Amino acid sequence: MGCMSRPITRLVGQGIRYATKLRGGGSAFPGLVMEKLHPQFVAEELAKLPEGVVVVSGTNGKTTTTKMVVQLLESQGLRVFTNRTGSNFVRGVAAALLGEMSLTGKLDADIAVLELDEAHAVHFVKMVKPRYSLLLNVLRDQLDRFGEIDTTRRMLSSVAGATSGTIVLNREDPRIRSLASNAQSGTKVSYFGLSDKLRSLFPSDDEMRGSTDVDEAVTAPELPAASVVLSDFAGTQATFGLEGREMTGTVNLYGIYNIFNAAAAIALTQEVLGEKLNETALLAELEKIAPAFGRGETLTVNGQTLQLLLVKNPSGFRLSLASADAKDYATMIAINDQYADGRDVSWLWDVDFHSLIQGGVTMVSGVRAYDMALRLAHDDVYVETVNEDLEEALAEFIRKSHGKPMRIFCTYTAMLAIRKALSKITDVEDVL
C-alpha cells in the first residue's frame, strides 16, 4: 500500500466508525475493515506513543483493573489511549484508535493501556511489543474456549516474553508468579500481592479445588517481595504497602476482589511513573473510580439501587457472594451459555452458594435457568421463581424486591440483555 493511500484508508475507517456509532452498534467492525485494508495500522500508530503500550490480561478483573490504571495514570498528568469499548482483541483496538484519532491522523496520547483477552493477547504481542504488562491471574474460565488453565498460562507467557520494559505479576497466583521465568533478559519483573492476613480470602485455582497438581500450592513457598501489597481493608478503606511505607485510601467499588485489583493498578502506575509518582493525586483519583460496565455497576430503579455483577468462573462468583450479606439484598441470578459466556456451565458446581440460604434467591433466569436452580437446590437455597425469559424475569424481580437493594449475578450475554431492558426504565451508560 503506497504512502498516499494510507491516510485515505484511515479516513475510510474513520467514516465507517462514525457510521456504525450513529447506527448504535458494530463497534469492532471498522477495526475489521482496517485489518483487511491496512494490517499494520495498529502497530504503526501505537509505535508513535512516547511512553509505549501497557497490556493488561488475565482471567478475572481485566476490565476494572484497566479502568483503574487509565484513571490513575491520567491523575499523574499522562494522556492515555485505551480500548474503552471492551473490544479486547486487535480489531477492537483498531476501532478504538479510529474513534480517538483526529481527521489529520493524530492520536493525542502519551501511553496506551489495553485490556486484552488471553487468547487475543497472543496475536497482539506478535504485532506490538508492550513496554509494560500487568498479568492478573489464571483461573478456570470459559474452558470450552481456552482449554485447561495451563493453556491459559502458556498464552500469558507469550505476553510476558514479548514485554520489553516491566512485567507486573500477581505473586499470589502460582501460575502467574512463574511467568517471571519467561521475561526477556533486561526486562524488569515486579509483583503485587497480599498480606498474610488477607491471603486466605483469595485462593488460587488449585487451592479452591483442593488440587495437588501444582507443588507450590501445597508447599507454601517463600514469595518474592512485592512492590505493592494490599495490607488490610475495612469497608471501602484499604491500606496498601508501597515498598516499606503505607498509604490508606478509599476504593468505592463493590467486592473485595476489586480492592486487590486496585493494588495491581497502583503497582503498574508506580512502574510507569517511578519517582515522579504523586501519591496524593493517586489516592484522590482512586476514590473517584466508578465500577466498569457490568462489574458492580450500580443503577437506580424505582428509588432503589440495583447492582449488576458479572460472573464467569468459580473464583469470581465466590468473591462476589462474599462481598455482601445476602439477607440485605433481593437477589437474581441470570445464566446464559452463548459463546461469550462459555458453553460449559459445569463450573457452577464449584461455587459454594450456602451464603444465599439467608434471604434466598428471588429470581433465576437465562437460558440455563433450570440448571442454576438445580444447583441452588443442592445447597438448600430457596428459589422463589424461575423464568427463562430475561426481560419478563427482570420486571418480576424488580416488583418482588419489596424496597430492598437489588443485585443481579449474570453471565456476559445475560448482562447485555438485562442492561438493554433496564435502559427502558432508568439511565444506563452507553458502552459503545
Image (cartoon, grey):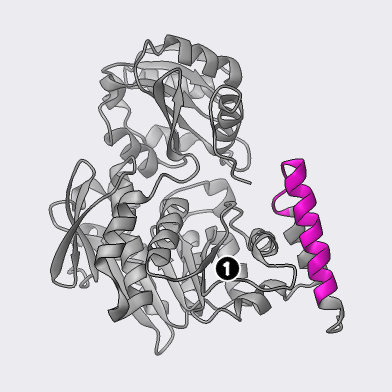
Does residue 24 lie above or below 171 as drawn?
A: above
Does residue 409 lie above or below 290 as drawn?
A: above
Q: Position of residue 33 (x, y in %)?
A: 80, 61
Residue at position x 30%, y 63% in the image: 281
Residue at position x 44%, y 22% in the image: 332
Residue at position x 67%, y 74% in the image: 106
Q: Is residue 27 magenta?
A: yes
Q: For mark 1, does the 10 Å Cα neighbourhood hold few (<14), some (14 to 19), or many (20 or more) residues? A: some
Segment colored magenta = 7-28
Tell which of 7 and 40 is nearer to you.
7
Tell which of 255 and 58 is nearer to you.
255
User: Is residue 344 shown to the viewer in this render?
Assistant: no
Please, what is the three-letter code of the amino acid marked with disc 1? Val
Tell which of 398 and 322 is nearer to you.
398
User: Is residue 102 shown to the viewer in this render?
Assistant: yes
Does residue 111 lie above or below 135 as drawn?
A: below
Q: Position of residue 25 (x, y in %)?
A: 72, 43
Tell which of 156 and 92 is nearer to you.
92
Residue at position x 44%, y 75% in the image: 132
Does residue 334 lie above or below 386 as drawn?
A: below
Q: Position of residue 342 (x, y in %)?
A: 56, 41
Left or right of 412? Residue 214 is: left
Residue holding disc 1 = 122
- Among the 4 quarters of the image, the one containing residue 350: top left
Q: Is residue 151 magenta?
A: no
